[in-house]
Image (tube, grey):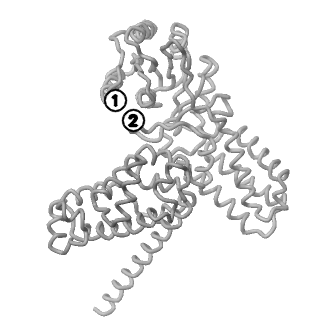
């Protein structure tokens, strides 16, 4: 997400850093490029106009012109203004006592309300709550079945009726929640392909009948300005408490994320960043601003790492690496954890300075699946001691995994490089694995190491090309 906007922001900052001196005219030129980039990202025109004005005033007021590093100061100002534009942080869900707390989801058809209801249920379930999902989208074919299936996958109760009366279903669901002791009710509602009076009247009647404690609008971020316009209209009729932006992992240009708070005055609570049911993140404006400016998002990366790696497991891993007993089974566990964290490419985007280098990296999550196949085709001895994998073993392993022998060789080499790097991490070169859990992990060092690996890979490719050309000449 935001790749195009990030690239244009970086281009503006690079042009400023190349100047020996920054003037008001330079800042004006930079803001012209920023304005164009934001409008191309489908950000609301009035929002863009105010944003550029605020950045210009702050830049001149902060004496950017007199600074030794004017481009860096300007980046900080732009980051702060983006954070203000999308903030403040408000991802809290306010629970009532006695319960249940009633959360109503509204929005247009196709925006992802039903999936978001399930994701939100999972989010609350993992935090010790007992949610009830209510299938109250009675207009879209198979909407009820979809929510029932998702609830079954998550082991979360779903209330549904074969009825056409959405108010009646909503009221009955609350009675059921009280009876069964559910702490939170998440109500999925009907949408349309566009806003109309019938749709607004229906959701307004449901809201009036059950008086939900919080109403969240679910918006498809890929629709840009349309998402902001619909948010404005819904807010006028329902008095929203917040917005959930979906499909932010797609080709979203960023307009909705940057505009919706400023236009509606309502905070963005959560963002959907994938199709999986755990791809719902709390929204943090400062982290999003950092991602947009290509500065990574270390805090989110560490949080995801903490979800997948237990502190005691990290300690055991360090001991294994220190003793030299780190094997393919351990390596596979790490790769599977990377998959759960969103994949290698998503992880690298969160490392400062890596976002604009991803085009040079050939990380493919499909490679992780091939790795699993190769490792599972190895014997226990081969997994523990990769050094024993000779040419005949490579052929056998390749046949078992359905790959080529050179794929096995490549994995063994990758493993050895990773083991060496992890050994350096264990020794404290990057702050140690355990420091992930105390906030002291040195991401700058890791970023440099990955960048170094990229250069080695490029040199290797160049050597292969030279050798190939040499053979052609000799032939």
Q: Quadrant of residue 169?
A: top left
Above or below, 232 against 47 in this view is above
Residue drawn where x is 44% and y is 21% of the image: 188
Q: Earlier in the sequence, mark 2 or mark 1?
A: 1
Q: Measured from the top left, where is residue 392 in percent x and y? A: 14, 73
Q: Measured from the top left, where is residue 309 in percent x and y? A: 40, 48
Do residues under tags 2 and 1 come within 8 Å of each other at their CB atoms? Answer: yes
Q: Measured from the top left, where is residue 303 in percent x and y? A: 50, 45
Residue drawn where x is 30% and y is 64% of the image: 325
Q: Measured from the top left, where is residue 52 in percent x and y? A: 75, 46
Task: Kindly state the secondary structure of the residue where label 1 is placed.
Answer: helix
**For residue 277, which numbered disc appears in the image?**
2
Residue drawn where x is 62% and y is 19% of the image: 239
- Mark 2 neighbour density, 10 Å: few (under 14) some (14–19) many (20 or more): many
| Lateral position of residue 284 relative to residue 202, left or right | right
Residue 208 or 43: which is nearer the viewer?
A: 208
Q: Which residue is mark 1?
A: 154
Task: Kindly state the secondary structure of the residue where label 2 is placed.
Answer: loop
Residue 194 or 117: which is nearer the viewer?
A: 117
Residue drawn where x is 49% and y is 63% of the image: 428
Residue 475 or 382: which is nearer the viewer?
A: 382
| Lateral position of residue 367 relative to residue 445, left or right | left
């Amino acid at each position: 997400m935001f790749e195009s906007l990030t690239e244009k922001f970086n281009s503006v900052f690079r042009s400023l850093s190349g100047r020996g001196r920054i003037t008001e005219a330079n800042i004006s030129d930079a803001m012209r490029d920023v304005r164009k980039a934001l409008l191309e990202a489908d950000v609301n025109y009035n929002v863009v106009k105010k944003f550029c004005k605020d950045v210009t005033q702050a830049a001149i007021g902060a004496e950017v012109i007199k600074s030794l590093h004017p481009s860096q100061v300007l980046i900080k100002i732009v980051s702060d203004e983006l954070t203000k534009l999308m903030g403040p942080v408000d991802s809290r869900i306010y629970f009532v006592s006695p319960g249940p707390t009633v959360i109503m989801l509204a929005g247009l058809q196709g925006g992802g309300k039903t999936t978001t209801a399930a994701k939100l249920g999972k989010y609350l379930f993992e935090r010790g709550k007992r949610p009830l999902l209510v299938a109250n989208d009675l207009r879209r074919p198979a909407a009820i079945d979809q929510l029932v299936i998702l609830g079954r996958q998550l082991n979360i109760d779903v209330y549904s009726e074969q009825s056409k009366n959405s108010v009646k279903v909503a009221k009955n669901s609350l009675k059921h929640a009280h009876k069964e002791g559910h702490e939170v009710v998440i109500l999925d509602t009907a949408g349309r392909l566009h806003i109309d009076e019938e749709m607004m009247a229906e959701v307004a009647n449901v809201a009036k009948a059950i008086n939900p404690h919080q109403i969240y609008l679910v918006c498809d971020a890929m629709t840009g300005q349309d998402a902001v316009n619909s948010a404005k209209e819904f807010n006028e009729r329902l008095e929203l408490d917040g917005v959930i932006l979906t499909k932010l992992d797609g080709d979203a240009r960023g307009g909705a994320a940057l505009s919706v708070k400023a236009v509606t005055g309502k905070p963005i609570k959560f963002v959907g960043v994938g199709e999986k049911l755990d791809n719902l993140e709390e929204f943090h404006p400062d982290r999003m601003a950092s991602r947009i400016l290509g500065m990574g998002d270390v805090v989110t990366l560490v949080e995801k790492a903490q979800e997948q790696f237990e502190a005691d497991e990290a300690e055991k891993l360090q001991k294994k690496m220190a003793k030299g007993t780190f094997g393919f089974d351990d390596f596979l566990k790490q790769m599977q954890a990377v998959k759960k964290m969103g994949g290698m490419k998503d992880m690298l985007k969160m490392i400062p300075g890596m976002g604009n280098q991803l085009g040079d990296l050939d990380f493919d999550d499909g490679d992780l699946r091939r790795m699993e196949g190769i490792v599972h085709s190895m014997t226990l001895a081969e997994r523990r001691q990769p050094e024993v994998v000779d040419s005949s073993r490579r052929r056998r392993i390749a046949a078992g995994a359905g790959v080529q022998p050179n794929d096995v060789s490549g994995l063994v080499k990758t493993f050895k490089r990773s083991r060496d790097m992890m050994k350096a991490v264990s020794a404290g070169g990057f702050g140690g694995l355990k420091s992930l859990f105390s906030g002291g992990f040195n991401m700058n060092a890791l970023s440099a190491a990955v960048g170094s690996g990229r250069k080695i890979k490029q040199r290797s490719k160049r050597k292969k090309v030279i050798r190939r050309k040499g053979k052609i000449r000799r032939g």
